[in-house]
Image: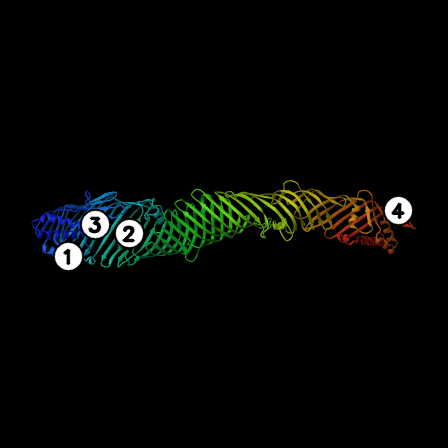
């Protein structure tokens, strides 16, 4: 149109000049034509007038544009005109042009231009400036940065009769932006009828190649009809109306995986179809209608559906949604509405889509139903999605209601599975910033259960009752500038869970995890960092872990895995399995650091009691695959005190056995584990430890010192015989002084005492080569040697009682139920001795009768040759003593002392402490004598 107007201007100028300067008409006309061409924006115009009359003009060698690449070039241009009409209407009767050439140039950005022709030149609108146009043998050349196309145009048009035009175009190869056309052949025929009807018939075949796909043997055909072409010729384009049908087929599309962001790449098609598509076909038919109100496109129907199919039988087909057009544009508004069905070996989904765009804002609503979907990256069960989105320029917002049964999702080396969940999400994207965010609309959403696997590390994580919440910002941030990056931030909680890495396993309620994760798909890198709080888990059915507070970091790439944690607090406790009731180790609080690299975890820690008493620090290592490891705990001068740290706060098994302790203890404790076996040991150093016990049988043990090596703690086992010293042992009726104990714990719930010896009344009281069990009844035989009778009487401290002699004996002490008793104990004298009593009881005996006086006379100086004592009874209760003295004693006969042989027996049944501390021994002996005399003993 612009060229036609330009031609009319040129012809008008030439005619006017011809009328004025007839004699110089030829040179002046040529000058005028070239000047007019230049003013119309043509570069380096050329034209030579070879004939000029009052009704005809002939131009030869008409050209414009750079030399060597003219934009337009015609050998001959002829025009028939009426100079009066030309003057008034600026129109001619007929124009004939050809042969000639028209050249189009495509630049690197895909812009199309005519070399040497200013796109802004010429006028716009209005009727055609001629009644008839004939183009003969006009060649069309299209130049691109790579390749070119060649074609030919012919046309014959008459404003009254109509006419026809045809164009042909072909190319071996031509690149337009990132699209390459190969083996291109196209043709179009336009027919204009005298009644104003117009028809077009066009075909295009060839190949189209992009980075994402290569489509071979494409065939496109257009058949259309229009009305009132005369309106266009008269300048009223809005009055034109028409319709047509486009049929297209791409039977061989090779999908390429190189461009992951391209819409039609193999990677994207795999995401859509759920299977690895390498080839596909696209075919369909659409009907187009155009009028003054706009353009509409409708899918042709079920006979020729618009569908993308694969040789394997996969298909993505589109169908009309009610009476709504597939596409409509008019009045500043565009809309699209359709239904789709996706079927493949890995997918079965249907949905409906409604889209519109007006005033720069677009909106889309799409309810989707997925019966099943499976691909290498993700697998879904029954799912329903309700999508609503809108955008204004580069900014997009969307709301998604989602209920899905996630069967599997692969994120690098991490695989999520069996995770049905539901939630409502808000999405915001900025295409200029290349950034999108996803947030949970209700702050949190639930996942009924989930299973996570990292196969190379043999890591399996199962969770139930999962809640995932937004953090301070969005749940997911996706950036795709230099590379694709996913940032995921949130708070994860679960009611129950289990973890397994090789043979290392944990179960229970996981801690609440506040996390920030970064996933880089191209690098296959995942980094997760955050905090842990609370939780209650059991590790390998042996160790309870609860109330954690700390931070962690996890790094995973294509080859390696690393995790580290810094814990401020973790409660550790012994887990009791089925049938176990005895808690050997009390709960403790741990703080420290741990590093997991591949399959080995190294850790360091500090232990305290829940009351805040520091126990020590340790280091260790754990091998995740076979659940083996070891740790060494260094006890840091544990100080015991009443009201403070007590042994039973470390081991509840000591409750009721050892209480009210004071003193200090150092040492190291070792644990090693593997499979179901636990090895343990300790090197302990006691420093003046005193305590009530052990058990109720011992009132208090004072000043325990020494070193003990334990080769096992469960049960307690020593490394051979160990020796400790004791300042004293208070067993109520039995008081032991400072002594040494050499013992061993063989690990069979018993103790073997090689030698335990205490000084006792000038002699010794000890245990030698004895063994006793911890459970049930235990007997410890105490042997007395070289006991000085005088020191016994000094300790008893009864006025008037004295004596001398040496005793030996044995006291079998039986421990049972936390009590101690003596059964069949005895003492006997070694050689002669003496007992003397001249106390107040002897003075009062004379009043009791002559026989009582004789008995006490004998006790004033009883010299025995043999003394035997039997002892029975509870140490914390009443003891029975049966004493027998054989010897001589003095009696008064007629006021003279006479020594006579004596067999003296005394039976006592009393609380020994009561006798000793209340000095009632003499009174009890007196009563025994009186009863004996009354019974003629």
Q: Secondary structure at mark 4?
A: strand
Give the percent coordinates (x, y) of residue 249: 26, 48
Q: From the viewer's perspective, is 501 left or right of 888?
A: left
> First in sequence: mark 3 or mark 4?
3
Label pair 1/3, CB-CB below 8 angstroms: no
Q: Which label lies toward us, 1 or 3? A: 3
Label pair 3/2, CB-CB below 8 angstroms: no
Q: From the viewer's perspective, is 856 left or right of 630?
A: right
Q: Is residue 282 visible?
A: yes
Q: Dividing the picture into quarters, in which one does residue 351 lie?
A: bottom left
Q: Secondary structure at mark 2?
A: strand
**Which residue matches tag 1?**
195
**Which residue matches tag 4?**
899
Q: Which label lies toward us, 1 or 2? A: 1
> First in sequence: mark 3 or mark 2?
3
**Which residue matches tag 2?**
306
Which disc is residue 118 wearing? 3
């Amino acid at each position: 149109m612009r060229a036609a107007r330009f031609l009319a201007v040129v012809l008008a100028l030439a005619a006017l000049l011809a009328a004025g300067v007839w004699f110089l008409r030829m040179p002046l006309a040529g000058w005028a034509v070239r000047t007019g061409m230049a003013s119309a924006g043509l570069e380096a115009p050329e034209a030579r007038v070879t004939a000029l009359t009052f009704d005809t003009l002939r131009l030869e060698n008409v050209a414009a544009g750079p030399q060597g690449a003219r934009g337009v070039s015609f050998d001959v241009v002829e025009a028939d005109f009426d100079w009066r009409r030309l003057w008034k209407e600026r129109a001619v009767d007929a124009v004939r042009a050809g042969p000639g050439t028209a050249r189009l140039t495509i630049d690197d950005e895909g812009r199309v231009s005519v070399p040497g022709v200013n796109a802004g030149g010429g006028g716009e609108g209005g009727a055609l400036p001629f009644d008839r146009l004939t183009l003969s043998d006009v060649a069309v050349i299209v130049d691109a940065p790579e390749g070119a196309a060649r074609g030919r145009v012919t046309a014959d048009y008459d404003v009254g009769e109509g006419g026809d035009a045809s164009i042909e175009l072909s190319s071996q190869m031509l690149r337009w932006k990132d699209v390459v056309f190969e083996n291109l052949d196209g043709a179009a025929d336009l027919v204009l009828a005298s009644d104003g009807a117009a028809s077009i018939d066009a075909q295009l075949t060839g190949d189209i190649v992009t980075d994402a796909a290569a489509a071979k043997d494409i065939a496109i055909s257009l058949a259309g009809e229009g009305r009132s072409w005369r309106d266009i010729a008269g300048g009223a384009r809005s009055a034109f109306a028409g319709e047509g049908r486009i049929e297209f087929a791409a039977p061989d599309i090779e999908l390429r995986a190189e461009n992951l962001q391209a819409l039609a790449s193999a990677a994207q098609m795999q995401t859509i179809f759920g299977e690895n598509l390498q080839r596909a076909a696209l075919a369909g038919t659409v009907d187009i209608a155009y009028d003054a109100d706009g353009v509409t496109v409708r899918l042709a129907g079920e006979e020729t559906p618009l569908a993308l199919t694969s040789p394997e039988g996969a298909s993505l087909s589109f169908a009309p949604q009610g009476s709504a057009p597939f596409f409509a544009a008019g009045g500043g508004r565009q809309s699209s509405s359709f239904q789709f069905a996706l079927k493949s070996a890995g997918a079965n989904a249907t949905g409906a889509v409604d889209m519109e765009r007006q005033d720069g804002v677009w909106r889309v609503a799409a309810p989707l139903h997925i019966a099943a979907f499976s691909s290498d990256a993700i697998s879904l069960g029954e799912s329903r999605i309700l999508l609503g989105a809108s955008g204004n320029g580069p900014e997009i917002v969307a709301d998604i209601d989602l209920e899905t049964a996630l069967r599997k999702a692969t994120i690098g080396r991490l695989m999520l599975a069996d995770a049905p969940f539901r939630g409502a999400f808000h999405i915001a994207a900025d295409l200029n910033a290349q950034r999108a965010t996803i947030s949970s609309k209700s702050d949190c959403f639930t996942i009924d259960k989930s299973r996570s696997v990292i196969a190379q590390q043999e890591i399996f994580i199962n969770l139930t009752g999962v809640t995932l919440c937004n953090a301070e910002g969005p749940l997911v941030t996706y950036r795709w500038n230099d590379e694709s990056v996913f940032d995921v931030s949130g708070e994860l909680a679960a009611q129950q869970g289990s973890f397994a890495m090789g043979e290392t396993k944990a179960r229970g309620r996981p801690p609440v995890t506040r996390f920030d994760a970064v996933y880089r798909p191209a690098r296959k890198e995942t980094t997760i960092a955050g905090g842990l709080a609370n939780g209650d888990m059991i590790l390998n059915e042996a160790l309870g872990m609860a109330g954690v507070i700390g931070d962690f970091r996890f790094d995973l790439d294509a080859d390696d895995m690393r995790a580290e944690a810094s814990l401020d607090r973790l409660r550790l406790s012994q887990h009791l399995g089925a049938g176990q009731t005895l808690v050997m180790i009390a709960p403790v609080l741990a703080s420290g650091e741990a590093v997991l690299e591949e399959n080995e975890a190294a850790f360091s820690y500090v232990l305290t009691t829940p009351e805040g008493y520091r126990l020590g620090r340790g280091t260790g290592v754990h091998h995740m695959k076979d659940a083996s490891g070891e740790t060494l705990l260094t006890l840091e001068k544990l100080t015991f005190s009443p009201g403070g740290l007590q042994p039973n706060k470390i081991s509840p098994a000591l409750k009721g056995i050892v209480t009210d302790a004071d003193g200090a203890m150092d040492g190291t404790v070792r644990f090693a584990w593997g499979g179901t076996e636990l090895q343990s040991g300790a090197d302990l150093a006691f420093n003046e430890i005193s305590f009530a016990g052990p058990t109720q049988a011992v009132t208090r043990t004072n000043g325990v010192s020494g070193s003990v090596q334990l080769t096992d703690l469960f049960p307690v086992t020593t490394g051979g015989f160990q020796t400790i010293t004791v300042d004293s042992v208070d067993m109520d009726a039995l008081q032991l002084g400072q002594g040494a104990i050499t013992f061993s714990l063989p690990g069979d719930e018993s103790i073997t005492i090689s030698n335990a010896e205490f000084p006792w009344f000038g002699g010794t009281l000890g245990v030698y080569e004895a063994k006793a069990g911890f459970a049930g009844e235990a007997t410890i035989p105490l042997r007395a040697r070289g006991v000085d009778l005088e020191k016994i009487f000094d300790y008893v401290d009864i006025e008037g009682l004295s004596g001398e002699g040496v005793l030996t004996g044995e006291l079998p002490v039986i421990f049972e139920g936390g009590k101690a008793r003596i059964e069949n104990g005895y003492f006997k004298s070694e050689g002669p001795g003496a007992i003397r009593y001249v106390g107040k009881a002897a003075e009062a005996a004379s009043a009791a009768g002559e026989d009582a006086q004789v008995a006490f006379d004998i006790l004033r100086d009883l010299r025995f040759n043999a003394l035997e004592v039997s002892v029975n009874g509870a140490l914390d209760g009443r003891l029975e003593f049966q004493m027998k003295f054989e010897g001589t004693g003095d009696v008064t006969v007629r006021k003279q002392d006479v020594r006579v042989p004596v067999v003296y027996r005394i039976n006592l049944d009393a609380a020994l402490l009561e006798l000793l501390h209340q000095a009632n021994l003499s009174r009890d002996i007196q009563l025994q004598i009186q009863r004996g005399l009354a019974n003629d003993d």
